[in-house]
Amino acid sequence: MIVVTGATGNVGRPLTQALADAGEQVTAVSRQAAAVPDGVRHVSADLAEPRGLTPALEGAKALFLLLSGDLHAPGARPADIIDLAASNGVRRVVLLSSQGVATRPLGPSRIAMSAVEGALRESGLDWAVLRPGGFASNALAWAESVRTQGTVAAPFGDVGVPVVDPADIAEVAAACLLDDRHSGGIFELTGPEVITPRQQAEVIAAALGSPVRFHELTREEAKAAMTRFVPLELADDTLDIISASNPAELRISSDVERVLGRAPRRFSDWVARNVAAFR
């Protein structure tokens, strides 16, 4: 049995499907009830209350651990999930971490994630850590404005990073959960090209076959929009990263190809699979 947390998200959903397709018994965990592939068990649990995971962990050999943003808040104890997994007989944990643990280690969320990585390395379990950069699926934030106004609005339109397709993250996670060769590995996951928000808008327009206008937001406009969903400190932290990517954040990693034996997908590949969201 393999337990997948965050099973209804952009990484967890394809990971759950990939494991099921591989013939594994899978338990999908999310906060709310959700549709899952045939043969997959679903358990509703909130990772902020780790003991609620106990029913999902019964009989599990491995765990994919995806921590939501609130688990980085002061007073949160996400490392307790690792202890709980070990006490329930889980032998392997694959942690979805962040590239920023290495590239910007002093940010509050990265300090918290680094502590979780440390707890996992010291747990005595088999482990692997995935450190993706920016997600291609972040472009879904533009879906409504593209549908209704033909517009992408974003700050720092000409500052790019090598965004990674969540499907690639899921495939690397599946490999790490199933193959002992990847135990003890830390994998930095990026796409194959640096691409800016303005260029992403052009890719979306090409896939739609209709114009998409790019509107560049000021930092303050972007912060006002972000703080409707995330704390002010996290909004400022994110804007600092996307306004001035450092050389480590611009580096194109070979780790997707090293694990999967193929090049990572391009942003255009992600758009082609998800173009219906923008119509």
Image: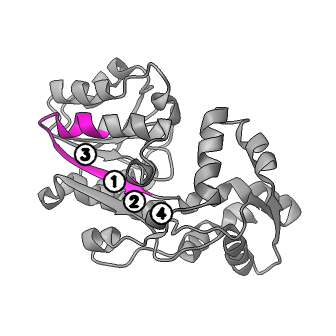
CB-based contact (under 8 Å), mark 3 and mark 4: no
Circle nearer the N terminus (1, 3) = 3
Circle nearer the N terminus (4, 2) = 2
What residue sits right under mark 1 in the picture?
Answer: 130
Q: CA distance from mark 2 to mark 3?
A: 20 Å
Residue under the point 35% across and 61% down: 188
Q: Secondary structure at mark 4?
A: helix
**Residue 72 colored in magenta in the image:** no
Q: Secondary structure at mark 2?
A: helix
Counting from the top left corner in percent of width and height, residue 121 is at 19, 40
How crowded pointer 3 is (Cα within 10 Å; few <14, some 14-19, many 20+) is rated as: some
User: Could you say which disc has been placed on residue 25 in the image?
Assistant: 3
Circle nearer the N terminus (2, 1) = 1
Residue under the point 76% across and 81% down: 209
Q: Amino acid at mark 1?
A: Leu
Q: Is 21 displayed left or right of 243 in the figure?
A: left
Residue in the foreground of this view, choosing between 247 and 157? 247
The quarter of the picture where residue 60 lies is top left
What residue sits right under mark 2 in the picture?
Answer: 169
Circle nearer the N terminus (1, 4) = 1
How crowded pointer 4 is (Cα within 10 Å; few <14, some 14-19, many 20+) is rated as: many
Q: Amino acid at mark 3?
A: Gln
Give the mark toward the camera: 4 or 2: 4
Q: Give the magenta-colored segment's residue range.
A: 117-132
Counting from the top left corner in percent of width and height, residue 94 is at 27, 46
Residue under the point 16% across and 24% down: 87
What residue sits right under mark 4 in the picture?
Answer: 249
CB-based contact (under 8 Å), mark 2 and mark 1: yes
How crowded pointer 2 is (Cα within 10 Å; few <14, some 14-19, many 20+) is rated as: many
Q: CA distance from mark 1 to mark 4?
A: 15 Å
